[in-house]
Image (cartoon, coloured by chain):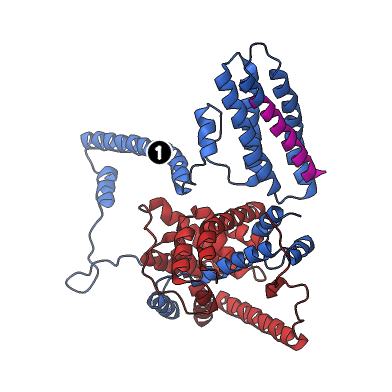
Amino acid sequence: MNCEALQRQLLRWESPDRPSADGSAHLADCAPCREWLQRLLQMESAVAHMPIPPADTARSALVRRVLAGDSPQRPQSAPVPAANGQPARRPSFALVLGSWIMDPHASRRRRVAAGLVAGVAAALLLFVTSWLVWYAGHTSAQVAVNATERVPVNPLLAELRRKGVRLPETEPKSPTERVKVMAAAAEQLRDRAAGRAIGDEELIALAQLYGRVVDEEVVKTAEDLSLSPEERREVLEPIARGLHQAESEWKRLTQQNGISEKAVAALNKAALAANNGNKRLEALFS
Amino acid sequence: MACAASVRYPERWERTSPPVEVGERLDQRNEANQLHDEEHLLIRGAQEGDRQAFARLVERYWDGLYRWLYHLAHDRHTAEDLAQEAFLKALNGLHTFRPGTNFRAWLFRIAHNTFANHRRAARPRQPYPEDLASRDEGPVEQALSREALQLLGKAVARLPAEFRAAFLLRAEEGLSFRDIGEVLGVTEETARWRVFKARQKLMSVLAPQLDREKP
């Protein structure tokens, strides 16, 4: 285990102060890693000492409230007492309207008017309900997007979007999802490089971007996956196969007529990235 | 990265570290068991309507919950309100808590939902306040300068909220990745990933400062 692998392992370990047997063996012989681990532990324990304003008053208030037997529900506004001390009684608008509509002694003309009022009210209620349902459906999606605080923009993802690579709207939140998304992005880049006649400059840009996606995203994220061996194989095997095919594809592109030396070098680098990626992924699941 | 000859182990993982006295270890375990039993009794009492028991649970969990919410909300009054609301919701929903499961994780889950509801309606978040007194002058504070502690506070505040929430549950509350997943409503794997990313970012920000402070 080298230093980088150990440090990544410790970062994703539940308790870095209790490393694996491999990790302990490495730490025994490696002073810089011991120092690095000390810093990590120091940083984690210092979190509990980060300054915050006191809230003793709020706590005491809550305890008093709990002991006083306050209802957890929000207090409801009490009815305003009348002059005689009794709550004022005032017929509600609904009661007045209802008795007017339902009055059995009303004239025929008044009964027609009442029917019209009831019909308009029903139509209005239906319209408002439908609108609320439609509005809730539209805004909830927006709220969900706003609710997740924006993750800082990853420059590589931004570059992929600029190149027209299709990516999900939000940055993947789990490493498994991230590996899959980035592997798909790498394939899109390769397809675009192979799909139609493009200039050397564009070809070089695509090949370089491909190498970065494979190295910086697919492989590194795959190395951080904390999955069972079976799950790891299930996720990584098809991606490794894709990288193997990509290597041949990039090499085939170097055989095109009229391609500059600079472009050939970039294509070879992309092929090398695919080859390395394939090997590193295979090492993770075999 | 270069490896050098061995110097001195940090105590906590030293292979040849002196064994902890058996009696001391048993004492620690007994103390933990006692706390667990006491908590179990308090929860049962509170479920049966004993307000005093719930008030003791509030005393026990207030600090951790308030600190966590403060670091999420960056505002004292918001954190106070959210903590109070979370406790009251917990009191209201105590009958749904299954004895034997993790009360801390259950309570923090309620607080997280309360925070999420608040955030939907909230204004842009407050900047991290600079002039705050730290909790106490413990050995860690002596080891880390005030400047480093401020830097850590700012770096934590700048973490994306989901990374920050997961990291603080691990570093401050000592929750397992599985419990963190339950609190935040994500898988254990995602919880691990978020803590990993948070640690990675914090180490990259703090390393130069810690290097400067090296004796």
> Hue of chain B?
red
Q: Residues within 10 Å of mark 1 (few under 14, many from 20)?
A: few
Name the chief secondary structure element in magenta.
helix
B144 to A119, vertically: above or below: below
User: Is residue B49 shown to the viewer in this render?
Assistant: no
Q: Is residue B69 left or right of residue A205?
A: left
| Residue B167 in picture, x, y percent from top left | 56, 60
Given residues B50 and A171, the one toward you in this image is A171
Q: Amino acid at mark 1?
A: Tyr
Whole-percent x, y for residue A81 in the image: 22, 70
Image mark count:
1
- Residue B142 shows up from this direction: yes
Quarter residue A59 falls in:
bottom left
Residue A275 located left or right of residue B174: right
Name the residue located 71 percent from the left edge and 53 percent from the top edge.
A5
Return the chain for callout 1: A
Residue at x-position 47% and y-position 59%: B155
Q: In the rendered image, which residue does mark 1 sit on?
A: A135
Q: Is residue A205 magenta?
A: no
Q: Residue furthest top?
A: A257
Q: Which picture quadrant has residue A259? A: top right
For the view shown, which residue lies furthest in the right direction? A286
Instruction: Find residue B76 and report its horizontal and vertical position in percent.
Output: 38, 67
Q: Is residue A81 left or right of residue A250?
A: left
Magenta stretch, residue numbers: A266-286
Q: Position of residue B193 (x, y in %)?
A: 62, 52
- State yes or no: residue A272 in magenta: yes
Which residue, as the protein is rendered here, is positioned at the far bottom?
Answer: B23
Q: Which chain is blue?
A: A
Quadrant where the image shows the C terminus of chain A? top right
B168 horizontally vs A224: left or right: left
